Image (cartoon, grey):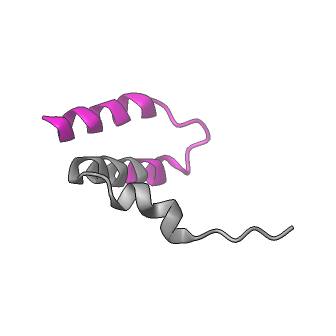
Amino acid sequence: MKINVDVQKVQEPITSASSEVQEIIAQVLKLEKEKLYQRSPRNINDDILKIIKEVIQ
């Protein structure tokens, strides 16, 4: 069974989000890429919470 995925439909919630949400997503993705090499990324939840607080304020 072949599944056709329309990339625009998948990305639509992100592209239609507010600029604050887009900024949070971008920063969290960057953080995840930075911690990708670690076997057990520590404190990532704290880092994500910090990103959210900074963008909101």
x and y percentages locating residue 40 in the rendered image: 59, 35
Percent position (x, y) of residue 54? Answer: 19, 37
Rendered location of residue 13, percent (x, y)? 41, 55
Q: Which residue sits at x=27%, y=36%?
A: 52
Magenta segment includes 51:
yes
The prevailing secondary structure element of the residues shown in magenta is: helix
Is 42 inside the magenta-drawn segment? yes
Determine whether 14 is above or below 49 in the image: below
Q: Quadrant of residue 47?
A: top left
The quadrant the C terminus occupies is top left
Above or below, 16 relative to 42: below
Residue 4 in the image: above or below residue 41 = below
**For residue 12, above or below residue 36:** below
Q: Which residues are magenta?
A: 30-57
Q: Nearer the viewer, residue 20 or 17?
A: 17
Q: Residue at x 51, y 64 (%)?
A: 9
Q: Residue furthest left?
A: 57
Front residue of this view, candidates 4 and 19: 4
Residue under the point 42% across and 52% down: 29
Q: Quadrant of residue 2?
A: bottom right
- The structure residue drawn at horizontal position 33% and vertical position 58%, both measured from the top left corner, is 16
Q: Is residue 46 left or right of residue 11?
A: left
* Drawn side of residue 26 relative to residue 5, left or right: left
